[in-house]
Amino acid sequence: MIFAAITFRKDGLADARACALWLTQSLRDFPCDRFDEAPMAEDWGQAVRVWIDDHACLLGCAAVEEGWRVIIADNLMRGVLAEARARRGAALAHLSSHIESFLRANAEVLEVERELDA
């Protein structure tokens, strides 16, 4: 499930892998259990998994006409109970907010636009 999508422009990112690696820099001060150090290839770009408590989230980056699109999604759909969905949604919201703040605080990043919020 895609939770949020954020587009932005930033010069100097050669490809989706470089974008995903750059985004992982922001995770060093994010309270998560762990995250992938190396991005994995997806058919739409590159992504890293981020574990927040027992929730596996996906932080992806894809090239788009506007520049770059960050995708924050649920990597593994676990639990159908309302309480489990609420905890997972809170983890995704926290990650999404952190990434958006990281982008907006970077002077080299232009035109940050949140496109989707689940």
Image (cartoon, helix red, strand yellow):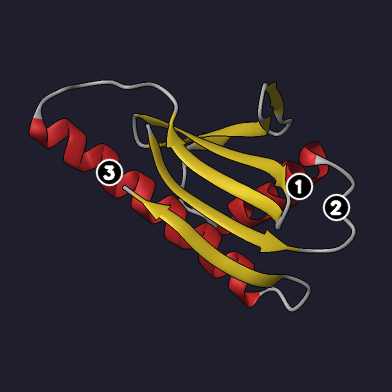
Q: Which residue is painted at 62% across and 66% down in the image?
A: 103
- Rendering quarter of residue 110: bottom right
Q: Secondary structure at mark 1?
A: helix
Q: Where 75 sits versus 53, above or below?
A: above
Query: Is residue 8 shown left or right of residue 4?
Result: right
On the image, which quarter does residue 102 sit in? bottom right
> Residue flagged by tag 2: what amino acid is it?
Leu
Residue pointed to by mark 1:
19
Characterize the local packing of mark 3: few (<14), some (14-19) or many (20 or more) Cα atoms within 10 angstroms. some
Disc with the residue nearer the chain's start (2 vs 1)? 2
Left or right: residue 69 versus residue 19 is: left
Relative to 44, residue 2 above or below: below
What is the x, y in percent for residue 25? Answer: 70, 53
Q: State the CA–CA distance, disc 1 to disc 3.
A: 24 Å
**For marks 1 and 3 on the same chain, the one whose residue lies earlier in the sequence:** 1
Say what secondary structure mark 2 lies in.
loop
Query: In this rendering, would 100 be left or right of 38?
Result: left
Crowd band around label 1 with a 10 angstrom C-alpha radius: few (<14), some (14–19), many (20+):
many
The residue pinned by badge 3 equals 89
Which residue is disc 2 drawn over? 13
Q: Amino acid at mark 1?
A: Cys
Q: In the image, which disc is placed on residue 80?
A: none
